[in-house]
């Protein structure tokens, strides 16, 4: 279903193969050898396509879908239309992701340095790197094997990049060390000096920013996001953390492992965030806070205090979620009463 | 009045001509042949300049202006200083825009490909394109006639761009199809993979992002804004929609026609927005919502529910505007009472 | 302590020299000749390092630090561990900044134009400029002496840049005039057309944006921030103003001197901000406001009215800080009472 100009499909795959790949259970073994050619959304899928139901908003679309097969949680299987093969999974979205990866593996370009790439003679590139047109790789930069540097991206002096990283078009990196399989999206800015100056009687005095950005394995940094280098300590992004677009990470921030930071959120300097914490869109955290493991910061929250492990907060200033909605309800009730 | 280093003025034009162009009415026909050389703001304008009054904050500046002529709504004409020629319009700002377009038409460069542009041999460029230095146009990209690609912009593989589009300096496009007369501002990021992963027991599983970005005719996307491609469905920006700077548009979002999305607003994945809706600055919408035609979302609003056609909401969580201000007033009154 | 791959340390310096540079007072003159090799954070410093204590959160780290010397406010000196030399300062962070500048002066590259820079023949470059690979300098641009233009940056036609400016990697400038010692961070967008159209019966009419961006001396504009040019008047950033990352400055905005605009804040068109005002992170100001000298706008504030000189506001809609926290407390109390 994907536009063949942009995406190259593999397959077809039998439902038995897809069940295995997707870590799902095929309900009717008679369908095991049925072959599917592609994945597709519920409304667009036809008999040769695999689809999925993850969000209960779309149960009606599921019930009317013409998909040949669908990955679905057991609780929804009775809504399936006749003739649809079902792959049951407790995590349908994850199962779909695995199946879709089989149909559409990450495209691998054959190793090449575009003649219009500008690679300093002192840079060291591992085997099988792809360096696109207009990319600039400065002196003493070190890239691991299998890296892909997009068009007009800039890898600054002495930057270290682990194996199998992808650096998006127009992204710029300096003063940073990246682990393996890191993905930097187009236009992201990594390693520039943080916002550091002393505001005093004598006006502003710039504080040299002497730290780095350390990005651990399997991190992603979204389009046009900014990660400033540390002022002395480093700025650290823990392994597996996912950062969406237009996010700001201030100097000396430490993000734990497996965190999720959604679009337009911002974290001010020196705040530490525990593993597996989630910051929803447009949330903001002031500096020097400690946010616990697994904390959940709601959309547009303005966090001014430490948040304990596992706590969910929202509002500006942020408070525990239950308190927030109780306060919202109280204000709504009072405003109605006064209005009478 | 504009700096001649950056802008080239046309004209002079007679007031009769300007009235026609501006779709305005010249009050005193004796002024019809008076010739003006330029547009200028009220405070800076002289006798040879055309100015305009649109915002009532500036009525005093109007009353004291030395402008030779002014576009003004009928209700303000009595405040005009003696000797000023008046062009009456019910939409003075629009009339000014039309007149200013006459003085300063969009500059057209003569067709050229800068020798330092990097254009893949398999790309197809229409007639009269201007490709600036350092721009990268990848394989199988297709550009319509009259396109302008700015310095160091990147047009990704197989991207399709309609006629008369302008792609700003340093912008990057991939996995997208653009209509006619689309303007992408510097540093905008179009078509990168959306924020798609399944968060489950087995950690995060990346979901291939198999859709595109479809941008219809006459759309503008502001500087450093980000528009992610769809995950399976497409992300769609309807004809004539205007997107300001630093805006985030998530995967699968559908914006209607003629929408206005102001700076730093964000729309999460799969939300649909009706025609002519307005999102004010820093507003945020969660995913999977339906926002009606002509809805108005206030600045910094946090929208967590569907919004009906024509409704105006504000606040976080967003509520109808009248309710919001009643609640604000209630809280202010109660806080004052308690303070006593 | 800084990673020698990225930073080159000067020195060592004696404590007498450092006290002079840092405008601080060495407590024990017997330490005057002790020589230090570097600066370091409290936890990481050893006997040969200079550290500093500025934030009282870190007093315990100070008390346990192994730093050879520390810059500290007089009030904290009694917490110092035995053997640590003390430099007293009323502005410890500023004093540290001065000392750190001595150890790590801004690196100066020797003048050079990278062969892969693309410099129009009609551009004028002052002495000792460094133009990096892939940078594009368009026709009639004028750069003062000692400027540094980063890789893949774009300087548009007729742009004027004063002496000793630094333009970050991938930044783009057009329609602007910069003073001396301006620093533009990577990916910042300066001078593109503002969000200007007349919304009327006849649809949207684009308004030519005929002003410039004027950036005075010693301004910094953070990574991926956007500053639109004026619509007729100019957009002006006053001398010494510091703008952080991902900030939006609309057309015709006038920022005073010495302002501080923190990450992800936004200022809508035609708003004027007085000298030394501070906008905290994610604050938003609607257009056409007047914000007084020394005003302080809190994080995430939504400012809809003028703010007088020296006033501090927060909340959305923004109110004076004291009022805001009283209202928050009132709501919390009422919600608790109703909950019982």
Image (tube, coloured by chain):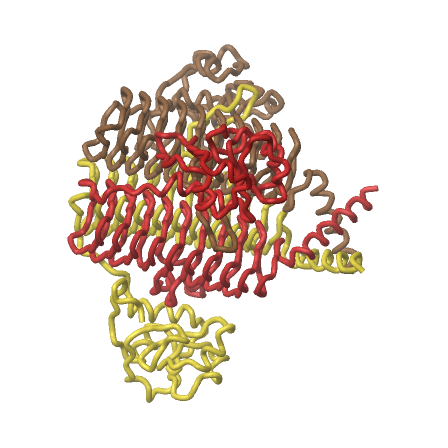
Chain colours: A red, B brown, C yellow
Residue C272 spot, x, y in % from top left? 50, 44
Compared with residue B269, is residue A323 higher up or lower down, i.e. above or below? below
Q: Nearer the viewer, residue C210 or C43?
A: C43
Residue C235 visible here? no
Outermost residue on the top side: it is B29
Residue nearer the viewer, C73 or A115: A115
Residue positioned most to the front: A30
Number of marks in picture: 0
Depth check, front residue: B73 or A164: A164
Q: How far across and how far down the image is residue C143, in percent? A: 25, 44
Q: Is residue A322 left or right of residue A242?
A: right
Q: Residue at x 72, y 54 (%)?
A: A326
Q: Residue furthest right?
A: A340
Q: Quadrant of residue C36?
A: bottom left
Nearer to us in this view, C322 or A304 = A304
Q: Is residue A188 left or right of residue A61?
A: left
For the point 61% across and 32% down, the residue is A63
Does residue A42 appear in the picture of this structure? yes
* Residue B175 locus on image (x, y percent): 38, 34
Quadrant position of the N terminus of chain A in the picture: top left
Q: In the rendered view, would you say C228 is above or below A1?
A: below
Give how far across and how far down residue C336 sits, in percent: 76, 60
Image quadrant where residue B36 sits:
top left
């Amino acid at each position: 279903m994907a536009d063949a100009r942009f995406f190259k499909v593999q397959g077809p795959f039998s439902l038995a193969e897809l069940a295995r790949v997707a870590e799902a259970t095929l309900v009717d073994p008679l369908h095991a050898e049925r072959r599917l050619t592609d994945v597709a959304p519920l409304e667009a899928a036809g008999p040769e396509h695999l689809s999925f139901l993850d969000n209960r908003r779309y149960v009606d679309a599921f019930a009317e879908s013409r998909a040949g097969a669908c990955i679905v949680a057991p609780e929804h299987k009775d809504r399936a239309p006749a003739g649809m093969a079902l792959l049951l999974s407790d995590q349908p979205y994850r199962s779909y992701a695995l199946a879709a990866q089989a149909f559409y593996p990450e495209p691998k370009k054959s190793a090449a340095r575009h003649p219009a790439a500008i690679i300093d003679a002192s840079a060291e590139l591992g085997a099988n790197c792809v360096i696109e047109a207009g990319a600039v790789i400065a002196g003493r930069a070190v890239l691991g094997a299998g890296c892909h540097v997009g068009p007009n991206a800039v890898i600054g002096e002495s930057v270290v990049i682990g194996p199998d990283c992808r650096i998006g078009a127009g992204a710029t990196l300096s003063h940073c060390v990246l682990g393996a399989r890191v993905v930097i999206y187009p236009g992201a800015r990594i390693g520039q000096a943080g916002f550091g100056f002393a505001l005093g009687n004598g006006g502003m005095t710039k504080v040299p920013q002497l730290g780095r950005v350390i990005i651990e394995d399997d991190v992603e940094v979204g389009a046009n996001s900014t990660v400033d280098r540390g002022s002395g300590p480093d700025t650290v992004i823990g392994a597996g953390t996912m950062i969406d677009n237009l996010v700001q990470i201030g100097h000396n921030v430490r993000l734990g492992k497996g965190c999720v930071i959604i679009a337009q959120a911002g974290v001010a300097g020196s705040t530490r965030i525990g593993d597996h914490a989630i910051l929803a869109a447009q949330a903001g955290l002031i500096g020097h806070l400690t946010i616990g493991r697994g904390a959940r910061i709601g959309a547009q929250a303005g966090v001014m205090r430490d948040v304990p492990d596992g706590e969910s907060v929202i509002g500006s200033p942020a408070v525990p979620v239950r308190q927030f909605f109780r306060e919202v309800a109280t204000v709504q009730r009072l405003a109605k009463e006064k209005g009478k």
